[in-house]
């Protein structure tokens, strides 16, 4: 193993173990101060659980990403993304404690996205030249803000965000290695911190991320996916998160059609309706299986992008149908 590979491996391991250690410490601290997520009609847990462990998880991620950038193993703008993710974690932790207005939260998301897009290469286009450059930036910003929020919306049962983040991370690593892209080290760090947290969040979860974790994780993973897209790997960037995109977007559209308040807590997502006997692990295993399939299709898309995207859409639709069927049979 050469020096760079050894340094990257050390950073990844430190990030994973750091995430686990900091999560364990945060769980105790949150519990002592009664910072708890109380069960209710719109929640999927039945006992109070400490909430807010996202802040230590993002601390581990940000520190590791800054270390990678310092060693030249990640683009220089990774430092900006890491700091913006940490800032979002702080804002969202305040929201975990006392519920900030939706407008304040959205403003923070938009500001973090705009700052990051300012560090994209001047001529880089996420939508592969289909849009004029100004519209490309606007569309990328809107898509990224939506991704941040859908990541938060989808964090509704034990283990789902940890599994999704790990799958996205490993998927980006695989695509990067086959395509010769430089996103692998940062993506591997994201997978490691997710696994470190998942040790405490698998059913029955003993601690929750809260908005302080789901929001900045959505921001960080959204950045990695947009970097793939802007560098020409648009098909893997679309395929890897497709189940999350489908569930959140279809659910939002259905709630909007019913005239419901879009940011209010609910249990309308397909994965939430699929719970039987409150068995979170069974649902998350299905999400994991779908993500493994999407990962394989992302690799296939390096040779046959349109065919792979078509198959991924079918897989995403099949997942929604499976969850809808599980929800209809009690």
Image (cartoon, grey):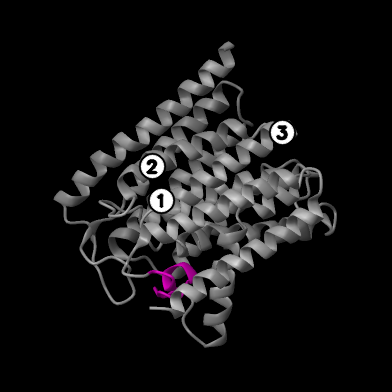
Task: Answer few, some or many: residues within 10 Å of disc 3's Cα (few below 14, many 20 plus, some between 14 and 19).
Answer: few
Find disc 3 in the rendering and name its residue.
178
Main SS, magenta residues: loop
Could one spot residue 297 in this view of the protein? Answer: yes
Q: Helix, strand or loop at disc 2?
A: helix
Going from N to C along the chain, the mark reached first, 2 or 3, is: 2
Between the residue at mark 2 and the residue at mark 3, the CA separation in whole angstroms equals 29 Å
Query: Which residue sits furthest left?
Result: 32
Viewer-nearest of labels 2 and 3? 3
Find disc 1 in the rendering and name its residue.
213
Q: Nearer the viewer, residue 100 or 4?
A: 4
Task: Answer few, some or many: residues within 10 Å of disc 1's Cα (few below 14, many 20 plus, some between 14 and 19).
Answer: many
Going from N to C along the chain, the mark reached first, 3 or 1, is: 3
> Which residue is depicted at the point 67% across and 54% down?
239
Residue 104 in the image, given as x and y percentages of width and height? 45, 64
Q: Name the side, left or right, on which 31 lies relative to 177.
A: left
Highlighted magenta segment, given as a residue range: 263-275
Q: Is residue 31 covered in magenta?
A: no
Per the rendering, the mark at residue 57 is 2
Going from N to C along the chain, the mark reached first, 2 or 1, is: 2
Q: Name the side, left or right, on which 291 lies relative to 129.
A: left
Between the residue at mark 3 and the residue at mark 1, the CA separation in whole angstroms equals 30 Å
Q: Nearer the viewer, residue 116 or 19?
A: 19
Query: Which residue sits furthest top?
Result: 2
Please report contact status of discs 2 and 1: CB closer than 8 Å, yes or no. yes
Location of residue 72 with respect to 220 vertically, above or below: above
Q: Quadrant of the C terminus?
A: bottom left
Per the rendering, the mark at residue 310 is none
């Amino acid at each position: 193993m050469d020096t760079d590979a050894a340094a990257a491996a050390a950073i990844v391991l430190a990030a994973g173990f750091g995430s686990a250690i900091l999560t364990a410490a945060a769980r105790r601290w949150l519990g002592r101060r009664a910072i708890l997520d109380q069960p209710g009609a719109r929640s999927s847990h039945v006992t109070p659980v400490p909430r807010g462990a996202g802040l230590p998880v993002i601390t581990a991620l940000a520190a590791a990403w800054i270390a990678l950038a310092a060693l030249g193993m990640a683009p220089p703008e990774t430092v900006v993304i890491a700091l913006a993710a940490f800032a979002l974690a702080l804002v969202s932790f305040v929201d975990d404690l006392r519920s900030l207005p939706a407008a304040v939260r959205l403003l923070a998301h938009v500001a973090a996205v705009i700052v990051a897009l300012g560090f994209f290469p001047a001529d880089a286009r996420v939508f592969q030249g289909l849009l004029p450059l100004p519209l490309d930036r606007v569309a990328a910003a809107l898509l990224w803000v939506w991704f941040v929020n859908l990541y938060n919306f989808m964090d509704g049962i034990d283990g789902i965000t940890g599994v999704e983040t790990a799958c996205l991370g490993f998927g980006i690593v695989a695509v990067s290695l086959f395509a010769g892209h430089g996103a692998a080290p940062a993506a591997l760090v994201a997978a490691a911190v997710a696994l470190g947290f998942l040790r405490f969040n698998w059913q029955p979860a003993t601690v929750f991320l809260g908005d302080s974790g789901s929001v900045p994780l959505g921001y960080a993973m959204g950045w990695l996916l947009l970097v793939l897209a802007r560098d020409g790997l648009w098909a893997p960037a679309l395929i890897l998160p497709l189940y999350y995109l489908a569930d959140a977007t279809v659910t939002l559209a259905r709630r909007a059609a019913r005239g419901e308040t879009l940011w209010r807590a609910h249990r309308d997502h397909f994965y939430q309706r699929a719970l039987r006997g409150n068995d979170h692990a069974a649902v998350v295993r299905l999400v994991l299986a779908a993500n493994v399939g999407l990962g394989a299709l992302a690799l296939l898309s390096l040779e046959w992008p349109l065919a792979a995207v078509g198959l991924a859409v079918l897989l995403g639709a099949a997942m929604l149908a499976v969850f809808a069927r599980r929800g209809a049979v009690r």
